[in-house]
Every structure is written in structure tokens, then in C-alpha cells.
Amino acid sequence: MLTYKGIQFRLYPDAKQQKQIAETFGCCRYVYNHFRASWENTYIETGKGLSYKACANELPLLKVDFPFLKDVDSTALQKSVRSLADAYQRFYAKLGKYPRFKSKRNPVQSYTTAIQGNTQVFTTTVTNNRIRLPKLGWLKIRGSRTIQGRIVSARSLAKRAVVISYR
């Protein structure tokens, strides 16, 4: 059985990185709400909801219609769709409530990104205390813990922290 561990680091992004993080929050929220509305409309019309695969296949078409979605991390958008699909699966299995629209007013904004290949490998150095996130580049962090193992995902929380999951 695989065991996942997580470490939370305090982020110190510059102004440009803060803007990019805020845009990513907004785009992930937009994609989530768009597909939630599509899911509900499809269910009303056909009696069946959408699937993750149908939403994931529609995501590139959505990027053509809304070019601002190309400016943010693509894996964050895919994880947003995956989160919606998981929420519907939990609802149908009677393990959770019906998924609600995400609000900009919610004080806790976050997005999750995946680690793919060698280009997005997180590296931390004890001397520099920096971490590299996709589309953001190198960010200053506070924390001296080292990551032992393969990094699986990173979740940025409210522009101030990042949680690194590894196994």
C-alpha cells in the first residue's frame, strides 16, 4: 500500500507571481463552474450527467473560446475537472452533498497541479529555499524540511502556502 505524505511551506511570491496565482484560482473556478452547469443541463435534458472523459475532451475547445485559459497551468484546469467528477461520484454514491458552484467570495481559494516529467520536477535547496511550480517559476519558501521520495502533486493555498504531496 502506498503511503502519501505532505509538507506545507510558506510561499513568498513576487507581484507577478501573485497575479498569476490569482489568475489560476479564477480560471480553475471558471472551468469548475462551467462544467458543473453543463453537467446539470445535460442531466436535465437527457437524464444522464456527463463523465470526466467528456469534460476533459471539451476542455481544449473551451480554451479556444476563452483564450485566457491558455495563460494558466493546464494541469490545474484538468485537476479542477477531475475534482468536479469526483464530487459527482461521491454524491451518487451517497458519500457527499450535491456539488455547488465555487464562489469568488470564499476566503479559501486553492488549486492543485500535477507533476509531469522532468521539466516540472520540484527541487528545493536548503541554501536558497526555493521551489519551482509550473507556470510560476521559482518561488521563495520558508521551511527547511527535505522531501524524501517522488513528488506527486502540489496544492497552492490562498496565495500564501503550498502543500507538496509525495510518496
Image: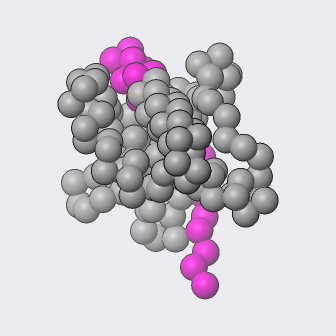
Instruction: Tell me what residue is drawn at x 45 percent, y 55 percent.
Output: 52
Nearest to the observer: residue 44 or residue 5: 44
Residue 50 percent coordinates (x, y): 48, 51
Which picture quadrant has residue 151? bottom left
Question: With respect to residue 75, does 141 lie above or below?
Answer: above
Question: With respect to residue 104, does 123 lie above or below?
Answer: below
Instruction: Tell me what residue is drawn at x 26 percent, y 33 percent.
Output: 63
Residue 11 percent coordinates (x, y): 51, 32
Instruction: Tell me what residue is drawn at x 62 percent, y 52 percent.
Output: 88
- Position of 162 compared to 70: left or right? right
- Position of 98 compared to 147: left or right? right
- Identify the image quadrant of the N terminus: bottom right
Residue 41 percent coordinates (x, y): 53, 36
Question: With respect to residue 97, does 101 lie above or below?
Answer: above
Nearest to the observer: residue 132 or residue 124: 132
Residue 45 percent coordinates (x, y): 53, 41
Nearest to the observer: residue 41 or residue 4: 41
Report if residue 15 lies within the magenta region.
yes
Which picture quadrant has residue 24? top left
Residue 26 visible (yes or no):
yes
Instruction: Tell me what residue is drawn at x 71 percent, y 54 percent.
Output: 91
Q: Specify start and end residues of the magenta stretch as a single range.
A: 1-24
